[in-house]
């Protein structure tokens, strides 16, 4: 038997530790690793460095002799699986976002939307701009940097307190376009496809309804907060104030929008063509291989479709703005690749961490306790958003939840006659709910960029997170009352 066979056996047969005291202790041991990772992430240390340490702490306390084998055969194995599946998406998305920035297209897109919506509707304008860029395939971190200078100028002119700006950016970039809108190319919408064999357009009605719920309630809250501030104004003595950014009027708005539209259109086309072209199972035989490469196409359709869409859109940006990006592409691409590597390895480390925690007796006890929630969709939503909150990462929490419990979610959904497309949308949206806790990377980034603190702005960000979380249960209600998918 493998050195960590006892852990695997417990995971397989679902046998909890004997006795209430042992069960409580096993849960506390599993939570110790989670607590350590939260503290490390909150204090700004590298998750890549400390995730394996956090994973090995509970293993050391549970079965010390298994540490080397669990690290090599479980943590690293699951980490590599994540990198294999999603690294191309991270790097293509990073390159695409950087080219949109270097080409000047992002400035034109922002200026065009603001001109259409109106400077007097500053909050709505910034939310729509951030949402459009995110849905167009630009990384949410790139969106914050691209939109902030315009947001600062609009908030100043409209006398809106700057402390409301992070929540405004969060509503536009970190909420409905991240995981609710059907077809969004963000990673939180792609991860469920490999587990449920769905595509990025899963449950379009529920995703659209959930998106509208988040957008309307979020805008209503921010508008109420703006009115409640009275004559406070933008404020003085702020740090990180940006210089005024002007759009390049030599770039026609249609040209600037074309690459974003291209991502969506080709994503639809490839999502439909790939199953037809490759069939349910695709085999490749090469002379140097001992066995053919066998790919279950439904598990990778969404990934391949988005990779193809991003590649075409990257070449489109390069062709439309070659002279603008030629001189800066070398340095810009280095920064983009470095960012993609960091994002991939951070999430992959959390994925490996979750795989180890899921194999421990304490997690099995927690999983069995959660099974007391009878409704499959509510169960999946609570599990996913809880793990996302614990890890401070939507993609990390989603990966942990599905890596550990996807089989259970699938079985319970089939038993209840629930389409897996609905389970996809519920888990994806739940991952982007309570992940926005203080140690979340996106929260830390938006506060750092805007020069504000948790004390000044986090309360409003947290309300947006609560609205986002409530949207998950709203679409569950809609599904059961209307049957819409």
Image (tube, rainbow, N blue to C red):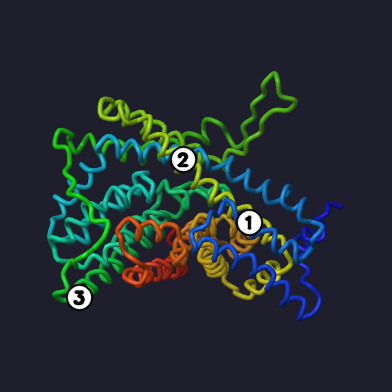
Instruction: Name the image quarter holding residue 92.
Output: top left
Residue with the mark numbered 3: 229
Q: Residue at x 24, y 63 (%)?
A: 238
Q: Residue at x 67, y 61 (%)?
A: 357
Q: CA distance from mark 2 to mark 3?
A: 41 Å
Vertical relation: 245 (above or below) 248: below
Vertical relation: 184 (above or below) 226: above
Residue 51 horizontal side relative to residue 168, left or right: right
Residue 428 horizontal side relative to residue 56, left or right: left
Q: Residue furthest top?
A: 287
Percent across and percent down for residue 163 are 27, 67
SS for dot 1 = helix
Which is nearer the N-term, disc 2 or disc 3?
Answer: 3
Q: Residue at x 59, y 68 (%)?
A: 35
Q: Residue at x 65, y 57 (%)?
A: 53
SS for dot 3 = loop
Residue 247 horizontal side relative to residue 61, left or right: left
Instruction: Name the image quarter holding residue 459.
Output: bottom left
Q: Would residue 227 be seen by someone viewing this image from the given angle?
A: yes
Task: Please tell me whether mark 2 or mark 3 is closer to you in this view.
Answer: 2
Residue with the mark numbered 2: 338
Percent across and percent down for residue 446 are 35, 58
Residue 421 horizontal side relative to residue 265, left or right: right
Where residue 353 is drawn, which disc sits there? 1
Whether pointer 2 and pointer 3 mark residues with C-beta atoms closer than 8 Å, the reply is: no
Q: CA distance from mark 1 to mark 2?
A: 22 Å
Q: Residue furthest bottom?
A: 20
Vertical relation: 456 (above or below) 302: below
Instruction: Name the image quarter holding residue 32.
Output: bottom right
């Amino acid at each position: 038997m493998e050195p960590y066979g006892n852990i695997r056996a417990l995971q397989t047969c679902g046998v909890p530790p004997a006795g209430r005291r042992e069960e409580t202790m096993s849960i506390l041991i599993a939570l110790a690793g989670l607590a350590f990772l939260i503290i490390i992430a909150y204090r700004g240390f590298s998750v890549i460095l400390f995730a394996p340490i956090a994973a090995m702490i509970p293993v050391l306390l549970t079965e010390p002799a298994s540490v080397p084998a669990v690290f090599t055969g479980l943590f690293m194995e699951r980490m590599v699986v994540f990198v294999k599946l999603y690294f191309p998406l991270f790097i293509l998305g990073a390159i695409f976002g950087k080219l949109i920035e270097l080409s000047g297209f992002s400035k034109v897109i922002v200026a065009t939307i603001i001109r259409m919506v109106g400077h007097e509707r500053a909050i709505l304008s910034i939310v729509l701009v951030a949402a459009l860029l995110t849905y167009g395939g630009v990384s949410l971190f790139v969106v914050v940097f691209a939109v902030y200078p315009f947001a600062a100028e609009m908030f100043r002119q409209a006398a809106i307190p700057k402390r409301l700006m992070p929540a405004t950016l969060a509503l536009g970039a970190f909420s409905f376009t991240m995981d609710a809108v059907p077809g969004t190319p963000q990673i939180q919408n792609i991860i469920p496809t490999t587990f449920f064999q769905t595509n990025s357009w899963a449950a379009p009605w529920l995703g659209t309804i959930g998106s509208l719920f988040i957008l309307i309630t979020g805008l209503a809250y921010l508008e109420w907060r703006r009115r409640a501030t009275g004559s406070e104004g933008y404020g003085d003595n702020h740090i990180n104030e940006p210089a005024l950014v002007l759009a390049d009027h030599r770039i026609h708005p249609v040209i600037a929008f074309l690459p974003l539209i291209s991502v969506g259109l080709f994503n639809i086309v490839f999502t439909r063509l790939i199953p037809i072209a490759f069939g349910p199972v695709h085999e490749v035989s090469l002379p140097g291989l001992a066995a053919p490469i066998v790919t279950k196409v439904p598990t990778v359709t969404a990934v391949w479709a988005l990779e193809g869409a991003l590649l075409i859109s990257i070449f489109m940006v390069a062709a439309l703005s070659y002279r603008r990006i030629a001189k800066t592409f070398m340095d810009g691409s280095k920064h983009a690749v470095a960012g993609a590597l960091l994002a991939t390895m951070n999430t992959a480390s959390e994925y490996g961490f979750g795989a180890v925690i899921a194999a421990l007796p304490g997690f099995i006890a927690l999983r069995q306790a959660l099974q007391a929630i009878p409704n499959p969709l509510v169960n999946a939503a609570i599990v996913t958003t809880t793990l996302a909150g614990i890890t401070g990462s939507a993609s990390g929490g989603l990966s942990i939840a599905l890596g550990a419990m996807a089989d259970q979610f699938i079985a319970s959904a089939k038993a209840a006659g629930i389409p897996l497309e609905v389970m996809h949308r519920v888990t994806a949206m739940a991952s982007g709910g309570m992940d926005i806790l203080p140690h979340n990377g996106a929260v830390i980034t938006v506060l750092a960029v805007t020069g504000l603190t948790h004390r000044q702005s986090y309360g409003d960000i947290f309300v947006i997170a609560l609205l986002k979380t409530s949207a998950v249960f709203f679409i569950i209600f809609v599904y059961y009352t209307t049957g819409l998918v």
